[in-house]
Image (spheres, helix red, strand yellow):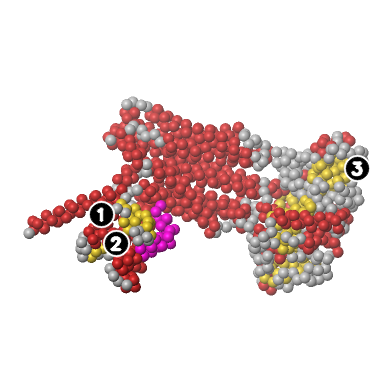
Amino acid sequence: MEWWKSLFRKRALDAQLDSELRFHIEELTEANVAAGLTPEEARRKAVLEFGGREQIKEELRDVHRVSIVESTLANLKSAFRLIRKSPSFSITVIVTLALGIGANSAVFSAIDAILLRPLPFPNGDQLMELRQYNPKTSSPRTRLAPVRLEDWNRMNSTFQAITGYYTEDNSETSGILPEKVTVAYVASRFLQVWGIAPALGRDFTSEEEHFGGPSAVLISDRLWRRRFNADPNALGRKLRVNGHSSSIVGIMPVSFLFPDRDVDLWSSVPVDEPIAQSREWTWYLGIGRLKTGVTLEQARANLATVQKQLGIAFPKTDADLNVQIEPLKEMTIGGVRRSLWILYGSVSLLLLIACTNIVALLLARAAQRQHEISVRFSLGGSRTAIVTQLLTEVFVLAVAGAALGLLVANAASKVFRALARDLPRVEEIRLDWRIVLYSLVCSVLATLVCGLFPAIRGTRRDVSSSLTQASRTQVSTRNPLQWLLVGVQVALAVTLLAGAGLLLRSFQELGRVSPGFDPRQVLTFHISGSYAETANWKGLTQRIDRIVDSLGSLPGVETAATDATLPGVPSHFQIELKFAEGQQDPERKIVAESRFVSPGYFATMRIPILSGELCREMADSTKSINVLVNRSFANTYLTESTVLGRHLQEVPASGILSPGEIRGVVGDAREEGLNREPGPTVYWCTGASGPDPFYLVRTRTEPMAMAETIRQRIHEIEPARSVFNIAPLTEHLDEAFAENRLRTVLLAFFAATAVSLACLGLYGTLSYSVNVRRREVGLRLALGALQGQIVKQFLLQGLGVSFLGCLAGSVLVAAFARVLSGMLYGVSPTDVTTLLGVVVLVLTVAAVASLFPAVRAARVEPMQVLREE
Amino acid sequence: MTVQKSDLLQGTLDLLILKTVALGPVHGYGISQRIQQVSREALQVQQGSLYPALHRLEKRGWLQATWGESESGRQAKYYRLSAKGRKQLQIEESEWNRLSEAIGLVLRTAE
C-alpha cells in the first residue's frame, strides 16, 4: 500500500526533499567558509556547485511518482491479462456481482429517495406538520381551526411561518363536461412556508387572501398541460370550481406535488371569511417552517406555551388542547420505513451470499495459482505486493460488476417503481451520482470482502509451498473452508426463503379469510361535492339520497349505497359512546368503530341482519338517527335481546350526532381491514356523512361494465358534478395490501435468487472437489469400487453441508421472523410447516446441484487418470 | 573524473553508495564527500545523480533513512544499510569483482 501513502503525503514529501537538499548546500557553504571565502561568496559557490536544485527535486519526485504509476499499471495490466485468460471465471464473478450490486443499488436508490433525502423543498428538514391534540377525547388528534392557526402563527417565536391546507374533490365546470379536480384549500403564507415560487405567474396577493377580494387559483403543471396544452396564456383564464369562478394567477413547478400527486388546484381561503371564525371548526392540517437553527424540542416547548396562553384567553375551546408537532417527512413516509429496511436487509444478505460465492471461487482459484504465486515469491516479490496484485484483480472484476450492476439497477429500479407506485415519494427515485457512488463503494467493499481473505490465505508462504507439494502426492485435498462458505450461503438462503415463505403464507391465509361481506361485483366511485354543502345537512342528505335511489333503479344494478370509508380497506374511527338510558358503569368504557352508511349498505355488501330490522334514513341526521350494531358490539356491551331500542350517545357530545336509536343487530364483518378481527362496530345510518362519500353499487354483471351507464345517469340528474375514481371494490382491497404485496414479491424474488446462488456455490465447490480428487476416485474405481458408491459419497458430502446450513439457517430464521412479526397474518413467526417446507425445498435443490458433479466423478476413466500421473 | 549517469552503469553508482553507507549511517552530503575522499578525488558524484539514486535504493528497501542532527547541529537525512541492502551489497560486490576480473583477463590476454 506504498502507493497511496505517497499519494497522500505528496506535500510532506516535498518538504522533506527540500530540507534534505538545503542541508547539502549549507554543508557545502560551511566547507567553503572554512576554506577562507566570505560567507556570501561561499554560499554562491555552493549553490553553483550543487547545480539545478529544482531540477533535482523534480527528478526525486519522479522516483516516487513513477513507482506509483508503474506498480498500479502493472497490477492492472496483469489483472486484465488474467481476466482474458480465464473468461468463464471472470464472467461468473462479474455477473454474480452485477446482480448482487445491481439489486442492492436499486433498493438503496429507493431508500435514498424515500427515507434519506430531505423532502424536495428548499431546506425540507425545517418543515413540520402541526395538529391540535385533545388528550381527553377518544380521537385526540384532530385538524386545526383556522383562527387557531392564525393565533399560533402570530404568537410563536420558533417558526418562520405556519400555514394550513385541506383537500377536496370537486368539479370544474368551465368546459363542456364537468371535470373532476382535486383542490387544496390553503391558508395564507402557503408558498412562503414551502419556499417555492410558481414556475409561471405569481403567488396570491393580500387582496386575494381577504374575504370579498378577487378569487384566484394556482394550478398544477399537470392540469396546465392537460387543459391548456402548456400554453403560457393560461394565466388570467378563468376556472369554475364548485360554481365559483376564479382566475388562474400562477402555474406551479412540475416537482411540486403537495399535499399529494393528485392535486390540480390551490385555492386561497380568506382569513376573515365569516365561516372560518369558529374556534371549534377543525379544517386544516397545519404546516410550519422552523426558523434556522431551531430544534424540534424548542418548537414544541414554544407552541405549548402559546397554546397555554390561548387556553387562558379562550378557556371553553382551548383549555384542553395541546399542540402536536412532527417532522413533515416522518408524516409523509410513515409506515414504509420498516418495509424498506427489511427489503434492504434482504438484498444485502443477497449481496453477502454473492460475495461468499466469489470467495469460494477465488479460494479454488488461489489453489490453482499456487505455483504462480510461489514463483513470484522466489523472484523476491513482497507479500504486500502480491496481495495488492491479487486484490487489484478482484477490484477490476468488482468495478466491471458494479458498472454492469448499474444497468441492472436501472432496470430493477423501474420494476420497483412500477410495483411500488403507491409508496410515498416514489416519483423521486432516480439513479444519479449518489447511486453511482454507492455502487462504487459496494464494489470496493466487495473487493475487500471477497478478495482479502483468499489473497492473504493464498500467499501464506509455508502453506503455499507445502500445498504445492501436497497436491501432487496426497490422495485428497481437504478444503473445509470452502465447505464452510457453502454452508453459510445455504444458511442465509434458508433465512431469506423462510422469510418469504412466511409472508406468502400470510397472503394465502388472508385470501382464505371470510370477510363477512361480499366484495365481488361491487363498483365504487366518488361524485364530486364540496364541504360548503355541509352548511345545509338536510339539503345534502336529500341530494345524496336522490343519487342513491336513482342509481338503485338502473337496470343491471341490484342495490346502491354510500359509505364514508370503503369496507375492507384499513381505516380507524373509534369513538367512545354511552347509553342514553340507565346507569353507566364508569369503569366500563364503551368504545366502538363508527361507520356512516346509507341503509342500502347492508344489502349491497350482503351483511345479514341478525335481529331487529333495517335502519331508516332520517331527513335530518342532526335531529334523530337510526343505528345498527354488529354482533360483536351486542355481545360485548349488552345482549342481543336487550340491545334493541336503546339509544347511543357520543362521549363527549360533539353536537353533530344526535343520540342514535339501535334498530337491529347485523353480522360481524372485517371492514377495518381483512387482516383484523371484527371489533364492536356501530353503523350510523346516514348517507350524508360528508359531501363526498364512497358510492357502492352491486351490479348483476362485471362491475366495470356498468361504469359508463352510471356516469350517464349522474350526468342526467346532476349535470354539474363529475364521477371519478371508478373502480371495483376488489381492486381497492388489493391496493390496501399493495405494500404488503411489494414486500412479499420482492422478498420472494430475493430468496429465489439467494437459493440459486447458494446452489451455484454448492455445485462449484463440489465440482472443484471432484476435480482435485480425480486421482483418488480413479484409483478406487480401478480397485473395484462401484460407481454408485462414488456418486453416493459426493452426493452425501453436498447434502451433508446443505443440511448443516439448513440447521444454522433455522436459527437465523428465528431472528429474522422477529423482524417480520406484525407483518404476518394467520401464521406464527416460528411456523414449523413453513420452515420444514423451506428445508425440504433447499435440500431438494441442493441434491440436484450435487448430483451433476457426483455423477461426473463416477464416470472418471481410471486408466486415463492413472496415466496422467 | 565525474560520475555521470551516462558515464557509468547505473549499478556502479548504486554499488558505490551501498559500500559507502555500509560504513555507518551517513547523509547525502557525507556520501558525496566520502566517495570523493576515498577515491582520492578521482570520482566526483554529481548531486543530480546521487540523490535520485539514494531515493531509488531507499524505495527498493536496500537503504533505510532516518532524520537526525548532524555534527553541525542541522537536521539531516541519514541513510543506513538494511539487512536486504547488505545482502544486495554482497551480491553486487561479487558481481563487480567477477566482472572486473573478467575484463582484466580480457585486457591482459589481449596485450
Query: Mark 1 = which residue?
Result: B19
Residue located at (37% from left, 43% from top): A459
Q: Main secondary structure of the magenta part?
A: helix
Circle 2 Cα neighbour tier, 10 Å, few/some/many (<14 / 14–19 / ≥20): many
Query: Chain letter of disc 1?
Result: B
Query: Which of labels 3 and 1 is toward the front?
Result: 1
Query: Mark 3 = which residue?
Result: A580
Residue located at (35% from left, 55% from top): B65
The magenta region covers A1-23
Across and down, in percent, residue B96 comes to: 20, 54
Return the mark for residue A43. Answer: none
Three-letter amino acid code at the position of disc 3: Ala
Circle 1 Cα neighbour tier, 10 Å, few/some/many (<14 / 14–19 / ≥20): many
Q: Quadrant of residue A605?
A: top right
Question: For this view, does A206 lie left or right of residue B78?
Answer: right
Secondary structure, mark 3, is loop
Asked if A12 appears above or below A40 in the picture, the reply is: above
Across and down, in percent, residue B51 comes to: 32, 61
Separation of residues labelled 3 and 2 (CA atoms)? 107 Å
Query: Mark 2 = which residue?
Result: B50
Separation of residues labelled 3 and 1 (CA atoms)? 112 Å
Across and down, in percent, residue A725 comes to: 72, 55
Question: For this view, does A392 lie left or right of residue A204?
Answer: left
Secondary structure, mark 1, is helix
Three-letter amino acid code at the position of disc 2: Leu
Asked if A200 appears above or below B110 in the picture, the reply is: below
